[in-house]
Image (spheres, rainbow, N blue to C red):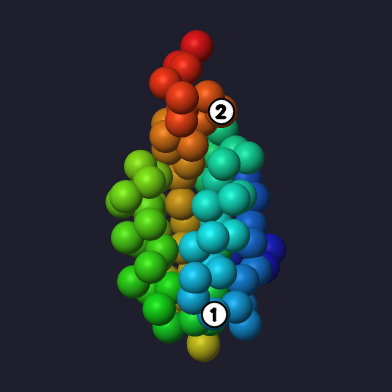
């Protein structure tokens, strides 16, 4: 998925994966990113339209954009501070 309608730092093509895999794979990718970097996700699972926005809200990431294309959904997520290395144990240095 290199033809996303927005600029991004990393992308994931998760078409064909069923719940909960799109969220789990997005979470793993975001854990490897630094705050402010953007992740473009394409998923075909209809539940992704609910699960990805909820995941972003609960995990502290910003859902910057969301769009529907053919039989899939596109999401642009900005990595939040909660995903920064060391954030889980309170280390913000």
Q: Is residue 18 left or right of residue 68?
A: right
Residue 51 picture location, percent across and down: 38, 68
Say which residue label 2 marks. Answer: 85
Which quadrant is the N terminus positioned in? bottom right
Q: Is residue 69 visible?
A: no
For the residue pair 68 and 15, the one nearer the viewer reads as 15
Q: Is residue 40 left or right of residue 63?
A: right
- The image quadrant of residue 9 is top right
Q: Is residue 31 visible?
A: yes
For the residue pair 68 and 16, the one nearer the viewer reads as 16
Q: Secondary structure at mark 2?
A: loop
- Crowding near the residue tagged with mark 2, few <14, some 14–19, many ≥20 C-alpha atoms within 10 Å: some
Q: Secondary structure at mark 1?
A: loop
Say which residue label 1 marks. Answer: 18
- The image quadrant of residue 42 is bottom right
Residue 58 picture location, percent across and down: 32, 50
């Amino acid at each position: 998925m290199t033809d996303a309608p927005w600029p991004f730092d990393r992308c994931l093509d998760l078409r064909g994966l069923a719940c909960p895999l799109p969220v789990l794979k997005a979470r793993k990718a975001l854990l490897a990113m630094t705050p402010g970097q953007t992740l473009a996700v394409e998923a075909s699972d209809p539940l992704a339209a609910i699960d990805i926005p909820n995941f972003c809200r609960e995990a502290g990431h910003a859902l910057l954009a969301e769009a529907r294309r053919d039989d899939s959904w596109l999401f642009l997520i900005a990595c939040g501070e909660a995903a920064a290395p060391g954030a889980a144990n309170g280390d913000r240095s």
